[in-house]
Image (tube, rainbow, N blue to C red):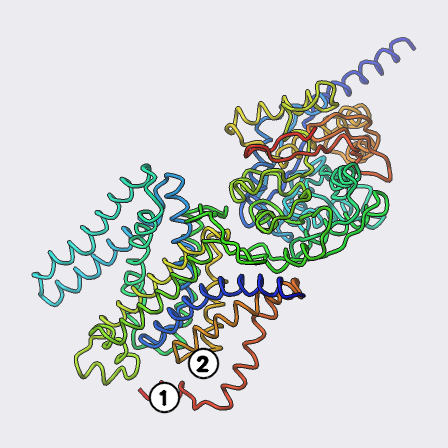
Amino acid sequence: MFTLRLASLALGCAFALASAHAEVTIGVSLGLTGPGASLGIPYKNTLQLVPATLGGEPVRYIVLDDESKPDNAAKNARKFVSDDKVDAMMGSTGVPSALAMAQVAAETKTPLISLTPLPPLPPERAPWSYVIPQPTELMMSAAAQDMKKRGVKTVGFIGYSDSWGDLVYNAITALAPTYGYKVVTNERFGRADTSVAGQVLKIIAAAPDAVVVGGSGAPGATPQIALVERGFKGPIYHNHGTVNLAFIQTAKKAAEGAIAPTGPLIVAEDLPADYATKAVSLDFVKRYEAAFGAGSRNAFSGYTYDGVLLLDAGVREAAKKARPGTPEFRSALRDALENVKNLIGSHGVYTMTPSNHNGEDERARVLVHVVNGEWKLAK
Amino acid sequence: MNADIALWLTQDGITSGAIYALLALALLLVFAVTRVIFVPQGEFLAYAALSLGWLQQGKVPGTVWLVLAAALLVALLEAREALRRKEARRLPRIALLYVGAPLALVAATTWAAPRSLGFAAQAALVVAIVVPLGPLVYRIVYRPIAHASVLVLFIISMAVHYALVGIGLLLFGAEGLRTNAIADTKFDWGVLSVSAQSLWVIGASVACMLGLWLFFERSLAGKALRAAAINRVGSLLVGIPIEFSGRLAFALAAGIGAVSGVLISPITTIYYDTGLMFGLKGFVGAILGGMGSYPLAALGALLLGLLESFSSFWASSYKETIVFTVIIPVLLWRSLVSRHPVAEDEEE
């Protein structure tokens, strides 16, 4: 009897050892070429900075280029599952590509860490996808709070005539009742437009207390410049897509005072010492800039980093239940991800629930403004 | 809409309309002389604006290397042709024009780039860089197929456009640039405050148009171009070489593109691919003017600028749709009233 027990114990140990040494495989599909490349490359850079283990298990990342095309992203995802037997996937650059991967993830029961925001998924697909970036509404609520503080009652909107403009517009109109303001204009412009004089005149004629711009990067500067030129005196709010150097370089002096929400890692140094993500954000930003040059920090690389942290927490739990490379492990990993609580990332603090697969709260965004040609934390 | 807003919109419309008018003239000029619908006209504008931006940042713009590479290619083509015709005496001239001159340009640019010279010097340098691209493109791409049909020339133009946009991305990267203004001052006239920059744009455009008019009316080369435009066979018979008129037309087009790029770059953000939109609007302007008369083309482009400005006020989401839709009634009307110039073209 005793020997039998010993034998089963030994066998158990052997299994535990074997599972401890099994390699976790993560498939990463990114748009490293094509129109999404300027985002895809920072997404990928981060993988050079992450440890060689996930939750204590050795890990192998397989990175494939999907050329920023959704059909290629889907193809890569299928290849990950069938050929590489991955335990989880990450990707991709752009909403359509990530959506294509989410479909494969649900079909093959493989957890997906989406690196771009996803629209609400149908119930059969939702359980397998986790989303790292902050929802637009969460981001814009930082601007809305600030507007309430300043007593803003009317808001003029000008944004891209595409889905990005729609997303920002929908976010600020959805937040309007809560924060007690009215959106009085919905002006649109194209990314390549040379002049927004007409739209800006209409906004100025409506005389709102503040303006929200649904643009991004350098093209987001066009309305900023026009508003300043026409002597608009109220605060001008942008969104997280605008927080980069190109915006300041384009708008030059007119950029001064522009306000925008962003992830805390962008201003890691300026965060108060007790800020929840300060240590993680600062550590990541320092290592990223050491590897890729001063001023190279960006939101996208942080999303990959937080995705890896999330997987790290999930794998740690799942490895107790099953061996990597098996359907049981994938299912255990999915369950473990859903139970991640208070995980501190570079962008925010993640607490997942079955109904919330993003799990970020107000700590995932800060308000920044342009002071002397630099994005600084607004205090 | 009140009078103030209408005045503002008019001012904005005239400023962009002036640029469209310049491009419309260039398109019309190239089309009349060489029958090429020069789609890449806007690329000269983008190249000039981005080159100016790089010079202002103290960097050597990649366009000089493009000029050098294209010139060396032309030098090879010309040398081969000269040797085939046993005209070795032409070689020194070829070397001077297509090797010496571009090298001098490269030297001048690398010397000037870090020195942050004034706006005028930098603008002049940019024009000197961009203008040679016109004749070089003509020599490499269009001269060998100068007798092809309008349609073939148009398709080739599309290809040249894609090539130049790709090269633009390679040379300047994907980010847009906005250069420093010639002058920051503003003049307040009642409710209207006019920026010195838009006065510059309008003034320089008018000066360019006057210059072109004088050139065509008074100079021999200009008269030769007009002759080539009116009747190609006839002008050949009286000794105006196709090559001469083509090269001159493209140089003028590149020059106009360069000037408009320099003028527009402080008031709008230019990307490597912004050129097409400007070129297209110049083209629509030329069509509004009937694709035959210079003053009408300039007027058409000006109207387009105003239409764009007012539609961005009333219906900003549909601005481009409105701007490009006006071409339909004009084309309908023209196809009803005009005799068909294409048939005339095919008789040749």
Give the Cα separation between the discs numbered 2 and 1: 17 Å
The label shown at residue B290 is 2
Check disc 2 and give the amino acid type.
Gly
Q: Chain of mark 1?
A: B
Q: Does residue A165 sit above or below A363 in this rendering?
A: below
Q: Chain of mark 2?
A: B
> Which of B206/B246 is in front?
B206
Q: Is residue A234 visible?
A: yes
Label 2 neighbourhood size at 10 Å, few (<14), some (14-19), many (20+)?
some
Label 1 neighbourhood size at 10 Å, few (<14), some (14-19), many (20+)?
few
Name the image quarter holding residue B222: bottom left
Where residue A191 appears, as percent x and y from the top left, is 58, 54
Check disc 1 and give the amino acid type.
Glu
> Which of B40/B218 is in front?
B218
Where residue A171 appears, as percent x and y from the top left, is 77, 48
Give the SS element for disc 2.
Answer: loop
Name the residue located 39 percent from the left edge and 88 percent from the top edge: B343
Residue at the limit of the structure toward the right, as seen here: A1
* Marks 2, 1 in one chain: yes
Name the residue located 12 percent from the left edge and 58 percent from the top edge: B91
Where residue A279 appears, as percent x and y from the top left, is 68, 20
Q: Which residue is tagged 1? A: B344
